[in-house]
Image (cartoon, coloured by chain):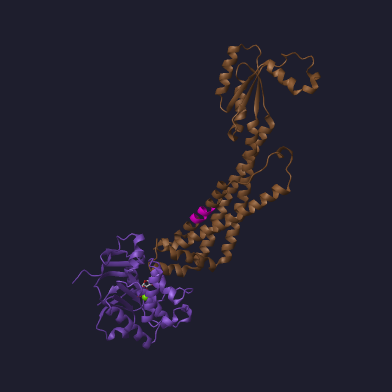
Amino acid sequence: MDAPLIELKHVYKSYEQDLTVLEDINLRIGKGEFVFVNGPSGAGKTTLLKVILCLERSTKGEVWVDGINLRRLSNYKIPYLRRRMGMVFQDFKLIENLTVFENVALAMEVCGVKKSVIEQKVDQVLKSLGLEIKKRIYPRRLSGGEQQRVAIARSVVNDPLVLLADEPTGNLDAGRAADIMSLFNEISARGTTVIFATHNQELIRSTAKRVIVLDQGRIVN
Amino acid sequence: MSVIPYIIPRTFSNMRGNWLSHLMTALTIAFVVLIFGLSTLIYFNLHRLAENYSREIRIVTYIDPALLPEDIEGLKAKVLKLRGVANIRYITRQEGYQRLVQQFQDEKDILAGLGEDFLPPTLEIEVTGTMYNLGRIRPLVSELTSLPGITDVYYGKEWVERLRQAADFTRLITFAIGGLLLLTTIFVVSNTIKLTIYLRRNELETMRLVGATNFFIRGPFVLEGMLQGLVGSGLAMLALFALFEFLNTQVSFPGFIRFFSPIFLPIPVVTGIIAGSIILCAVVSAFSMRQFLRV
Ligand SMILES: Nc1ncnc2c1ncn2[C@@H]1O[C@H](COP(=O)(O)OP(=O)(O)O)[C@@H](O)[C@H]1O
Ligand SMILES: [Mg+2]
C-alpha cells in the first residue's frame, strides 16, 4: 500500500483538562478511499474531522495529511492546507447574505482564482448538483436538502484531495438522504477520498465500505 | 496578490451592512481632526508671526566709552561667538549721533545742547530668526551682560517673552489635542470595526473554514479603516479651509498683526495630517481584528 493520505498516530484530544474527547486514535486512510465514521452522538466524530482539517489541534499524537505533519504546520500555512480539503458542516455554514452562487464562489475567491475561471467552475458544479436554477437565491429560501447540496457544492468546487462530511444526511428524510448518499458515491467514484461521519446506523448497515466505529472517543471495531 | 480583486468589493459590502455607524465614525474623526487642524493652524501662524518678529529683533548693548580699540575688537569677537548671534554692528559715538540727527531732522531743537559724544558707543546685535532663538534671547542677554566692557543691554523684552509663551502654549495645546485625537480615533474606529466583526461573525468564521488567509479576512477591515480615515480627515481639512477663508475675509485682525497675513496650512502639512489619519485608522483596524484571527 502507498503512503496513506491521512494518518493518525496515537491521537488524543481534550477540550478541557480532565475530559478526553478522542483517545488513542490510530487510523490510516488511503487515497480514493470511502470511509464511514459511525458512532453515537457525542462519540467524537465531529472532533475527529476537525482535527484532520486543523480546526482543532490534537492534544497528543501525530496527524499526517498528504505527507504533512500537522503538528509541525505553522499557523499561517493552515489556510493552504484547508483549501486542499473540502468539508461539509453539520450546520452547513452558508453565509446568509450571499447567494448560492456567491457562497460556492467564496471557496475559490479565498484562493485568488480568476473571476472567469470561478464563474465557469461554479456554474459547472451547481449544474451537476441540480442547483443552477437556484444560483441567484439566498440560502434561507432553500429547503434543507438544497442547502445541504450547496454546502456540498462549496466543498468540492476546489477539487479537494479529501472530502470531510459531517452528518450530511442528518436533517433529511430517507429519500433525500439516499440522493445525498449517491452524490457522495459519485464524488468518490471520481477519485476523491471521502470521510463520512454519521450517527445513522441504517445508512451503514448494508454498505460494503469501510466503517470506523467511535464510542466515547475510542475506535471500537 | 490575486485575492485583492475580491477584498475591495467585500470592503464596500461590509460597510453597506452598517453604513450608519460608519458615517458616525467618519464624522467623529472629521470633528476631532478639525480641532486638531485648527490648533495646528494657529500654532503654525503664531510661529510665522514670531519668526517675522524675531527677524527684526535687535539687541543693543552700550559699551564702556573707556574701552581701547583693541579691547573693542576682542569684545566683538567674543559676542560673535555667542549662540544665536547672526550679525553685529559696531556704532561709534559719532555715528550714533548722526543717526539721531537724521531721525529728528524736523525737530533739531531736541538735540540742541547735546554734544556729539553724549551717546555711548553701541554694539547692535542681530539674532538668527528662528523660534529656538526666541527662547535663547534671555540667556543670550545675560551672557552679554556678564561680558566685561558692556555696560547695558536693551531689547524688546516683554513682547518677545509674550510671543514665545503664546507659541509654547499653542504647541502644548496642539499636542494635547493630538493625544485626544489618538484616543478618540482608537476608541471610535475599533468599536465600529468590532461591530462589523460582530455582525459578520458567521461569515468570517466560514471564510476561515474554507481556507481564507488572515490577509484575506483582515484586508477588508483595514481598507475600511483607511477609508474612514481618508473621508474623516478629508472632510476636516475642507471644513478647516472654509473656516480659515471665512475668518480671513470677514474678520479684521487687531493692531499688532494687522500687517501679518495668516496663511493656510501648507500642502505637505495637510497631506501629512490626512496620511497620518489614514495610517492611524488602518493600524487600529488591524489591531481590533487581532483577537479574531486565531486559526
Ligand atoms: N469546543 C468544545 N469544547 C468543549 N467540549 C467539546 C467541544 N466540542 C465538542 N466537545 C465535546 O466533545 C465530545 C464529542 O463531541 P463531538 O466531536 O461533537 O461528537 P459527535 O460529533 O460524535 O457527536 C462531546 O462530549 C462534546 O460535548
Ligand atoms: Mg457531530
Image coordinates of residue B63 in percent, x first then y, are: 65, 17
Q: Residue pushed farthest bottom?
A: A175
Q: Is residue A174 left or right of residue A220?
A: right
Say above or below: B227 vs B259.
below
Chain B: what color? Answer: brown
* Quarter where residue A216 is shown: bottom left
Chain identifier for the purple-coloured part of the image: A
Q: Nearer the viewer, residue A181 or A213?
A: A181
Say above or below: A112 vs A155.
above
* Residue at x-position 42% and y-position 80%: A147
Give, as a single range, the part of the protein colored magenta: B277-283
* Residue at x-position 41% and y-position 81%: A132
Tally the marks: 0
* Quarter where residue A20 is shown: bottom left
Say above or below: A209 vs A28.
below
Image coordinates of residue B232 in percent, x first then y, are: 58, 57
